[in-house]
Image: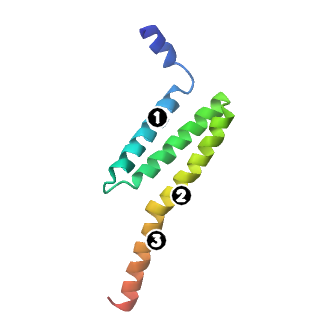
Amino acid sequence: MIEQLQTTLQTPFIWVEIFATTCGLFGSFVLACKGRHAQWGWVLFALSNIGWLAFGYGYGHWFFFIQQIGYSITSAIGIWKWLIEPAINRRYERVVREVLGL
């Protein structure tokens, strides 16, 4: 059993696989909890996507790679909708209040 674990830990992409799995699980957890920082789940998903893209490319799993491209697009949309767009809106509202003297 220990020999098998040692062999597994020496495979080329094992640390990428562990990283991508961990980020994906934490991203799901953060979003599912709908807490104050739920939007950061999308960033964790994006990090997971990067890891899985490297893994799929490294092992030649092309359909998996294509799937991860699709997931990366949804992660980018989530980051835009949950992080970037609200930040732009907050900045816009602050500028408008300053201009109007509110």
| Quadrant showing the N terminus | top left
User: How far apart in space, not on screen, are marks 3 and 2 (Cα)?
Assistant: 15 Å
Q: Residue at x 38, y 91 (%)?
A: 100
Location of mark 1 (residue): 21
Tell me if residue 47 comes above or below residue 8 in the rendering. Answer: below
Q: Residues within 10 Å of mark 3 (few under 14, many from 20)?
A: few
Where 92 sits versus 56, above or below? below
Residue that label 2 marks: 77
Residue, disc 3: 88
Q: Position of residue 35 (x, y in %)?
A: 31, 54
Question: Callout 1: few (<14), some (14-19), or many (20+) C-alpha neighbours within 10 Å?
Answer: some
What's the residue type where badge 2 is placed?
Ile
What x and y, as percent, mark residue 15?
49, 29
**Residue in view at x 60 percent, y 36 percent:** 54
Identify the mark at residue 46; answer none if there is no mark.
Answer: none
Q: Secondary structure at mark 2?
A: helix
Which is more N-terminal, label 1 or label 3? 1
For discs 3 and 1, the disc positioned in front in the rendered view: 1
Secondary structure found at label 3: helix
Compare marks 3 and 2 and give the one earlier in the sequence: 2
The residue under label 3 is which amino acid type?
A: Ile
Where in the figure is residue 62, as x and y percent of width and height? 68, 35
Where does the C terminus fall, quadrant-wise?
bottom left
